Image: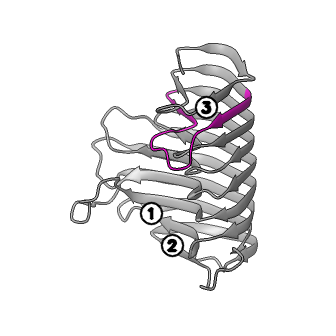
Amino acid sequence: MGFAFVNNSKINGIHSINSQNTHITMFVCNNVTLSRLTITAPGHSPNTDGIKMARSQGININNVHIGTGDDCIAILSGTKNLNISNVYCGPGHGISVGSFGHNSDEFDIEEIFVKNCTFKDTTNGLRIKTWASPLNHPLKAYNIVYEDITMIDVHNPINIDQEYCPFRNCGNKVTPSGVQISDISYRNIRGTCRGDVAVNFRCSASNPCQNISLENIDLRRSSGSKERLRNRCSHVNGAIHGQQFPPSCI
């Protein structure tokens, strides 16, 4: 179902099942609250995003259960002042900022707040992804806060990927992303990781990530995993506070 140019509204009590594509889309919406929603699709079903939005502001998403084959929530170009709280995500690809940074008609993403959310058996947890391509105009993703997050057997719990390319033949075409990512805070992120890398910051060589803050991060190997868990950073500037496990690469 799609909502376009909707203002000052509430959407609640809906159960969306097995959509053939994105379950709920929002375009140029303002001051809309989505609550008490259940969104489900098989974990292997492609392109079945739970909630996808663009060019919208003042959106509140709370008390929502999402399990799909793609992003639980996809935050696209022009989204600002978004509040997400008490969301259960799994299966799926996590909560994603992007992808963006590929087209000339895109806008900044800013003021995103994600709090008290749980991810279980997802490929990603908290992901920011921008295309590996230059831009002819400045584009930013900034002022994003993730706080009080629980990860349960998540493959990539914390991930910034500025070399995103969904095609198989990207190897020789990857160029530094033109998107500037800055002022991102991760606070009180705890749980288990079933991949090898808990925190993976792969930022742009031409626009390094700036002011990335990690505070009280405690991510452990899922039971039964033998490889040592690690973090990986490239082209990122920031600071750490409190506990850091695995040890921070910033």
- Kind of residue sitting beneath label 1: Cys
Q: Which residues are magenta?
A: 35-55
Of mark 3 and mark 2, the one earlier in the sequence is 3
> Of helix, strand and loop, which one carries label 3?
strand
Of mark 2 and mark 1, the one earlier in the sequence is 1
Circle 1 packing at 10 Å, graded few (<14), some (14-19), many (20+), is many
> So how many labels did they put on this image?
3
- Kind of residue sitting beneath label 3: Ile
Q: Tell me which corner region of the image, top left, top right, bottom left or bottom right, holds residue 212.
A: bottom right
Q: Which residue is mark 1?
A: 203
- Kind of residue sitting beneath label 2: Cys
Residue 26 in the figure: left or right of residue 207: right
Q: Which residue is mark 3?
A: 17
Asked if the residue at tag 2 contacts the one at tag 3, i.e. Cβ–Cβ closer than 8 Å, the answer is no
Relative to 37, residue 85 above or below: below
> Of helix, strand and loop, which one carries label 1?
loop
Residue 27 in the figure: left or right of residue 166: right
- In percent of width and height, residue 219 lies at 71, 71
Which residue is pictured at 69% across the width and 54% down the height? 119
Which residue is pictured at 38% across the width and 56% down the height? 164
Separation (CA) of disc 2 from disc 1 = 8 Å
Q: Which residue is mark 2?
A: 233
Relative to 88, residue 169 above or below: below
- In percent of width and height, residue 71 lies at 54, 45
Along the viewing direction, whichever of 158 and 145 lies nearer the viewer: 158
Which residue is pictured at 52% across the width and 75% down the height? 232
Along the viewing direction, whichever of 236 and 170 lies nearer the viewer: 170
Q: Is residue 42 magenta?
A: yes
Asked if the residue at tag 1 contacts the one at tag 2, i.e. Cβ–Cβ closer than 8 Å, the answer is yes
